[in-house]
Amino acid sequence: MKAFIVSKFGSWKNLKLVEMKEREILPNYAKIKVKFIGLNFADLMQREGVYPKTPKPPFVPGLEASGEVEEVGKNLDKNLIGKKVLAFPIFGSHSEYIYTEKFIEIPQNMPLEEASAIGVQGLTAYYSLIKLGKPEEGEKVLITASAGGVGSLLIPLAKYLKLNVFGLCGSKEKVEFSYNRGADFVINYNEKKWYEKIRDEKFDIIIDSVGGSLMRKLIKTLNQEGRYIIYGFSSAVSKKFNYLKAGFQFFKMPIIHPLFLISKNKTISGFNLSLIENIEKLRKPIEEVFTLWKKGVLKPFISKIYKFEEIPTAHKEMQERKTIGKIIIKLSS
């Protein structure tokens, strides 16, 4: 089978297409023929070597993919063979086949391309806003990277919950896109004096995928009894990655004293989907995501579909912040 490996940490140029031997199927695992791969910013961080639990090269990166079950281990029901599924291998999706125990059947009427676009990012949006944000009608929420894969799902989800939605993104095109997704007010953080537009706002919920020096500013706008949820650290991966810049962003993160939280009844939560290792814990949340998809609330915006051989290009364009919404990779067979 063909797969892309990270030959060494660093540039997208270090993604190499190789032929790999097929593996033995473990008792609780399934062999899944990949149809679509959902690309996530975390995949770039795996490639750079700054994602939690990243193995040493060479390894196959990639959080998620959709496809069909081709074979199952001895402990699984053979009726699963032929079923359409969404898989969360955490590492390994950049391949023609995935061997994993972390997979869930998708609704019969859900196209596989949409499944690959709503898995990791739909669950992240659901957990961040609903489980951790605990929103109440009329509250004010700020979403960073509002034109990204998660952000573009958070906006309609927040509007569905009757929240006032502020978006933060990095270009005029992304500002327009965020408005089209339903945001009430959107700010381009690449414009001069952008922070002055929100410095006097008080947000009940802030959902942040950027971290770094941006978090230092945004934490000041969190309302009393506010909830700050951080689920990513994209500021660590610049357009041309280097470890000094990543380290700089790490040290620019604010140091939060517990008394700061106690004195204002504020909450800061972190979320990383890949650390939920038991697939059973994801079944109810993903069913909620599927229900919201059926209602038309969580409809992913797929801006571009790449060929399997174009995975390095997809990494490059995402890292250069040229993408909007979700980008996916289609396998030819």
Image (tube, helix red, strand yellow):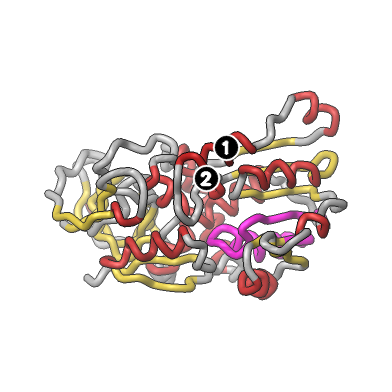
Q: CA distance from mark 1 to mark 2?
A: 7 Å
Task: Look at the numbered discs 1 and 2 and tell me whether their residues touch, using CB distance below 8 Å.
Answer: yes
Of residues 312 and 288, the one drawn nearer to the viewer in this rendering: 312
Residue at image coords 53%, 61% = 149
| First to last magenta residue range | 139-166
- In this rendering, is residue 136 above or below 244? below
Quadrant where the image shows the N terminus: bottom left
Mark 1 lies on a secondary structure that is helix
Mark 2 lies on a secondary structure that is helix
Residue holding disc 1: 250
Residue 236's label in the rendered image is 2
Q: Quadrant of residue 174?
A: bottom right
Counting other residues with Cα less than 10 Å from the Cα at mark 2, is it few (<14), some (14-19), or many (20 or more)? many
Q: Amino acid at mark 1?
A: Phe
Quadrant where the image shows the C terminus: bottom left
In the image, taking residue 317 as reference, residue 295 lies left or right, namely: right
- In this rendering, is residue 300 above or below 140? below
